[in-house]
């Protein structure tokens, strides 16, 4: 966030949704919340600054969606954007820290059912003595947010938008998803799902931008956004920050990861499903290329992709030393791409999914292996650790293909037993079926773009090493296996 995004706040009590910018009120609210948030924020799955000092918290915006009732019997609902993790002396981006979205409920007494949602009990400031908790877990407050999404308009710093013609029933019962997630999601009555982005930055989030663009093409592979909300305020960043997207919920669906695990454990052939998934990927790519800009990268611009990969590798080596022995081998793979560019090679680029893996594709179809499984693609946010501007850059479609190939490898790794080659064979067969499906679906044959495919697979494996080191250290051996294989292949 730029420095122009000075702290501002709505009142902790008062008329609904009014933004009351005086700095004094912002700092009073922050005085109440700093203590509880300092303990709670770093514990959250979606907190990106793990292992780094939290730094001073700053309140960027506050909007009161519902005032606390004067008797304190009904909850209040506060929407906050809070900045944390500022690192003085670093790049302008990291110096500013990260901006997080919080939806906080406030009550005098917390019912037992909401105990696990407690953020803390401020000991000073305007919220002193009250219970502050994660509002999404309170059906009453989650329901209120759904109501807001049904009604386009502004409220304080927030703007609510709704797709023309989208049917959003009222009064749907909310349930918060509990799985490992980068963001937070609430399912409403098995009809809609709301994703609340946690780390937010100025600029439209591709998870809203791309599904909206795809809906314009009539592409049925991606749930069309039904409603969304953003933050924008005078004196703040030029571009609004996307805060949440409501889309149809595919009830009864299973993701590709679960189906792949079932195939590996129980035996049914996954290759027809992998082939159908390749076709679906090609279809989504074609639709994105139809509505959003495309380009052709040659010469220095294509070489730039290889240089970017080398830089990311070097940065990763600094963080995960286990990568160091493979650095030279992996660099040779990127050098082959740079060479290809120097010899006149080119790459078509377009907007992509950006973080495609088996957990991002859903199907409600019958048993695994059924040919023609209808795959739906979700989560177009891109790799969560990258800056938003990077995630919105066009790239070669083979980048998504490489992501999915890595995922087949990941799935097989869960079943790898020494001396038994079945899992490795499963991965080989499904990777081949996926690439064939992609080409049959009208996409460029990924195997014909060898340098690009290998480089993107390597780049993804390096990203995964960092991801696992940060979030799931016990999974680190999975991408490390690929790192060894890719470094040896490039030698
Ligand atoms: N439209 C949908 N229908 C059914 N389930 C969904 C839908 N969108 C998301 N999900 C479920 O919610 C989970 C989290 O969604 P995702 O967009 O991947 O969030 P995150 O960015 O936090 O990882 C998915 O793994 C999937 O199980
Ligand atoms: O789904 P997210 O957008 O949160 O993506 C992040 O988390 C993924 C794990 O949940 C991670 O994916 C990696 O693990 C998957 C198995 O759990 C595997 O299928 C993927 O191939 C592998 O990259 C993803 O990289 C990360 O961005």
Image (tube, rainbow, N blue to C red):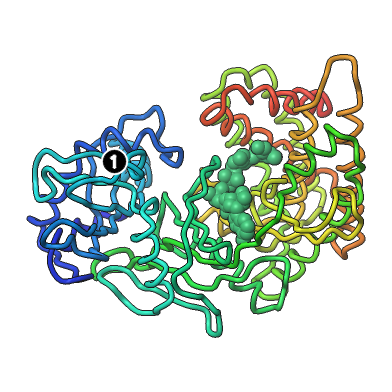
Task: Tell me what residue is drawn at x 51 percent, y 75 percent.
Answer: 168
Task: Tell me what residue is drawn at x 85 percent, y 50 percent.
Answer: 367
Nearer to the camera, 79 or 56: 79
Q: Quadrant of the C terminus?
A: top right
Task: Tell me what residue is drawn at x 92 percent, y 56 percent.
Answer: 371
| Rendered location of residue 400, percent (x, y) | 72, 51
Nearer to the camera, 335 or 376: 376
Res 136 visible = yes
Q: Is residue 206 left or right of residue 287?
A: left
**Rendered position, 139 above or below 220:** above
Instruction: Farthest residue to the bottom: give it.
Output: 165
Label 1 environment density (alpha carbons within 10 Å; few <14, some 14–19, many ≥20)? many
| Rendered location of residue 442, percent (x, y) | 87, 65
Q: Quadrant of the N terminus?
A: bottom left
- Give the residue number, with chain letter if any, for mark 1: 119
Res 382 visible = no
Q: Is residue 30 left or right of residue 87?
A: left
| Rendered location of residue 312, percent (x, y) | 58, 36
| Rendered location of residue 351, percent (x, y) | 65, 62
Q: Is residue 178 left or right of residue 89?
A: right
């Amino acid at each position: 966030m730029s420095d122009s995004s000075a702290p501002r706040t709505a009142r902790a009590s008062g008329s609904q949704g009014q933004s009351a910018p005086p700095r004094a009120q912002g700092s009073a609210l922050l005085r109440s919340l700093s203590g509880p948030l300092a303990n709670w924020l770093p514990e959250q799955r979606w907190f990106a600054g793990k292992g780094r000092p939290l730094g001073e918290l700053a309140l960027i915006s506050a909007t009161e969606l519902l005032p606390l009732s004067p008797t304190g019997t009904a909850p209040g609902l506060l929407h906050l954007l809070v900045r944390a993790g500022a690192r003085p002396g670093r790049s302008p981006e990291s110096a500013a820290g990260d901006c997080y979205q919080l939806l906080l409920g406030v009550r005098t007494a917390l019912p037992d059912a909401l105990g696990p949602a407690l953020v803390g009990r401020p000991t000073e400031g305007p919220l002193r003595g009250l219970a502050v908790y994660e509002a999404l877990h309170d059906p009453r407050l989650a329901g209120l947010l759904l109501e807001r999404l049904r009604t386009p308009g502004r409220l304080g710093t927030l703007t609510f938008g709704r797709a023309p013609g989208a049917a959003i029933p009222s009064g749907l019962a909310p349930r918060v998803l509990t799985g490992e997630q980068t963001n937070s999601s609430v399912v409403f009555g098995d009809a809609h799902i709301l994703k609340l982005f946690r780390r937010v930055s100025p600029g439209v989030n591709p998870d809203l931008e791309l599904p909206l663009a795809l809906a314009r093409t009539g592409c049925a592979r991606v749930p069309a956004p039904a409603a969304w909300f953003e933050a924008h305020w005078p004196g703040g960043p030029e571009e609004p920050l996307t805060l949440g997207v409501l889309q149809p919920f595919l009830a009864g669906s299973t993701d590709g990861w679960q189906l792949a695990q079932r195939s590996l454990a129980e035996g049914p052939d996954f290759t027809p499903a992998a082939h159908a998934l390749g076709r679906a990927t090609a279809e989504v790519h074609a639709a994105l290329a139809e509505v959003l800009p495309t380009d052709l990268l040659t010469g220095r611009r294509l070489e730039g992709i290889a240089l970017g990969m080398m830089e990311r590798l070097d940065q990763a080596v600094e963080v995960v030393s286990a990568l160091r022995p493979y650095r030279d081998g992996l660099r040779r793979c990127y050098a082959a791409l740079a060479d290809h560019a120097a010899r006149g090679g080119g790459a078509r680029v377009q907007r992509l999914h950006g973080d495609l893996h088996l957990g991002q594709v859903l199907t409600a179809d019958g048993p695994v292996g059924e040919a023609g499984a209808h795959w739906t693609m979700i989560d177009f946010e891109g790799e969560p650790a990258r800056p938003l501007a990077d995630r919105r850059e066009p790239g070669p479609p083979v980048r998504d293909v490489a992501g999915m190939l890595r995922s087949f490898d990941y799935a097989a790794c869960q079943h790898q037993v020494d001396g038994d080659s079945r899992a490795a064979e499963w991965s080989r067969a499904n990777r081949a079926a996926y690439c064939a499906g992609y080409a049959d679906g009208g996409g460029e044959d990924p195997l014909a773009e060898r340098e690009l495919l290998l480089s993107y697979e390597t780049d993804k494996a390096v990203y995964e090493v960092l991801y696992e080191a940060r979030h799931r250290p016990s999974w680190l051996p999975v991408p490390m296996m690929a790192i060894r294989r890719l470094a040896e292949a490039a030698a």
